[in-house]
């Protein structure tokens, strides 16, 4: 699998969740070092106003994926 194919899968999934109303907005940036190595960063705003910030180092030369970093920020008041 190439990094561009992996990114396509991510954008398709985000698009499907946006159509359902679960995700209100999204932003993705990429830094491709080779066809199989790179960095993907993004932020997703969910319908409950929480944000998911993520950063993933992707090395598709091997079957093991590594380097996913997530940070979730909840904006709003607790019920």
Image (cartoon, rainbow, N blue to C red):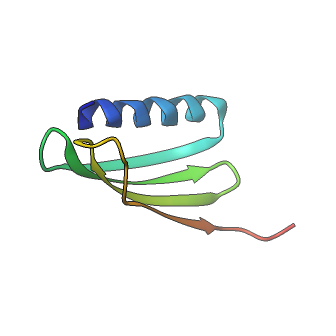
Closer to the camera in the image, 59 or 3: 59
In the picture, the quarter occupied by the N terminus is top left
Question: Which residue lies at the image location 65% right of the left edge and 57% below the top edge?
Answer: 49
Residue 5 shown left or right of residue 25 in the figure: left
Residue at position x 15%, y 38% from top? 35
Q: Among all residues in the image, which is located at the extreme left?
A: 34
Q: Is residue 55 above or below residue 19?
A: below
Relative height, residue 33 to residue 78 (above, below): above
In front here: 78 or 57? 57
Image quarter of residue 4: top left
* Number of disc labels: 0
Residue 54 vs residue 76, the one in the foreground: 54
* Horizontal and vertical percent position of residue 79: 87, 66
Q: Please, which residue is most extreme toward the front here?
A: 63
Query: x, y (%) of residue 76?
Result: 72, 68
**Location of residue 22 in the rendering, given as x and y in whole percent from the top left corner:** 65, 40
Query: Residue at coordinates 59% horizontally, 43% vertically from top-left?
Result: 23
Please tell me which residue lies in front, 29 or 76. Answer: 29
């Amino acid at each position: 699998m190439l990094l561009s194919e992996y990114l396509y899968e991510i954008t398709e999934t985000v698009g499907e969740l946006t159509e359902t109303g679960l995700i209100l907005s999204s932003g993705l940036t990429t830094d491709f070092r080779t066809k199989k190595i790179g960095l993907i960063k993004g932020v997703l705003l969910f319908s409950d106003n929480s944000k998911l910030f993520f950063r993933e180092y992707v090395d598709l030369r091997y079957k093991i994926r590594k380097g996913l970093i997530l940070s979730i920020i909840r904006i709003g008041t607790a019920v």
